[in-house]
Image (cartoon, helix red, strand yellow):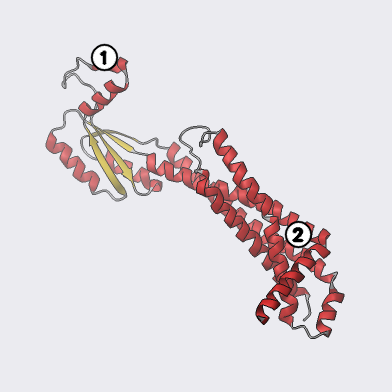
Amino acid sequence: MKIFRIISRNIRDAFKGVFRNFSLSLASISCITITLIVVAVSIVLSYNVENFTKLVEKDVTIVAFLNNDLKEENIEDIKNQISSIDNVEKYEFISKQDITKDMMESSDIFASIMKDWSDAENPIQSTFQVKVEDIKHIDKVAKKIKKIEGVTLVKYGEGMVEQLVSVFDIVHKVCIISVIALILVTAFLISNTIKITINSRQREISIMRLIGASNLNIRIPFIIEGLILGALGSIIPIILTIYGYEALYSNFNGQLFSPFIKLLNPTPFVYTISLALLGIGVLVGMFGSWRAVRKHLKI
């Protein structure tokens, strides 16, 4: 029972400290709020960029066009050579008959033009469609496939794909660095704010010492105070994250600029981010308080 009385007393003292020094507490809460809003934007952007990259990796396909004069055994030989190339995840052979059929089914115009073509007259080439494991090395795979005898042309959106992945990778790294930097800056600012609070309460601390309060008993209320400030500072960023992202997703139909760039589904994404923001706010508040107490209380 004694431990519960100590915990409840520390929590009560922490709440008193927050409201007794309301102007300084408000400054700390505002600092956490503003920073967490920027952190939320960075995290949302980072996760969506990662999702864009995965979609690119999933959708990009190397298309190898084959010579129309190839026999069945030649096609089998090309298949074996492709399967032996490093970084090839999977591949699929699509005959020109299948391609012609799909084209005819997709458009009445194609159907009208192609319906009377014989195999000998059909100029469409059979293809191998190849997926790679690591898109960063897709160029090497394409070059190796191009050297295979019987392959006349290789296409995969070269140039644009590498640039797109490179840009996404840079944005993702910048977002991560920004989040870490913002958290550290917030901890420092809160530490300095709480330092001012502590300096304004030196008399209170001196009285606590005189009545025999231990170092731990003096520190704990300040750390809980930091926890409360962090939790309060995370409320607005959490609300903005949940309703803001859901509004963005709804207004843009789950995509940005084109169906190629899809946004992550709000559920459970926004709730995961909200928990992360709450955790960051609480930990940053507690760390800032602990740092201020450790460095500026001579106990």
Give the residue furthest to the front: 1
Depicted 188 relative to depicted 165: above or below = below
For label 2, count other residues whose C-alpha is less than 10 Å away and answer few (under 14), some (14-19) or many (20+): many
* Image vertical order of residue 272 relative to residue 153, above or below: below
Where residue 243 appears, as percent x and y from the top left, is 61, 43
Q: Camera-side residue: 75 or 273?
A: 273
Q: Residues within 10 Å of mark 1 (few under 14, many from 20)?
A: few
Horizontal arrangement in the rendering, residue 267 relative to residue 153 (left or right)? right
What percent of the width, then of the height, locates residue 265?
A: 50, 43
Spatial CA distance of label 2 from label 1 is 72 Å
Q: Residue at x 46, y 33 (%)?
A: 259
- In the picture, the disc for residue 83 is none
Specify whether residue 164 is in view.
Answer: yes
Q: Secondary structure at mark 1?
A: helix
Q: How many marks?
A: 2
> Looking at the picture, does residue 22 appear above or below residue 297?
above
Task: Answer left or right for 282 relative to 21.
Answer: left
- Quarter-of-image position of residue 59: top left
Q: First in sequence: mark 2 or mark 1?
A: 2
Observer-side mark, 2 or 1, equals 2
Of helix, strand and loop, which one carries label 2? helix
Which residue occupies 19% across, 45% down?
80
Type of the residue with mark 2: Ser
**Quadrant where the N terminus is found in the figure:** bottom right
x, y percent for residue 115 = 22, 16
The residue labelled by disc 2 is 28
Q: Amino acid at mark 1?
A: Ile
Look at the image and tell me whether residue 291 can be seen.
Answer: no
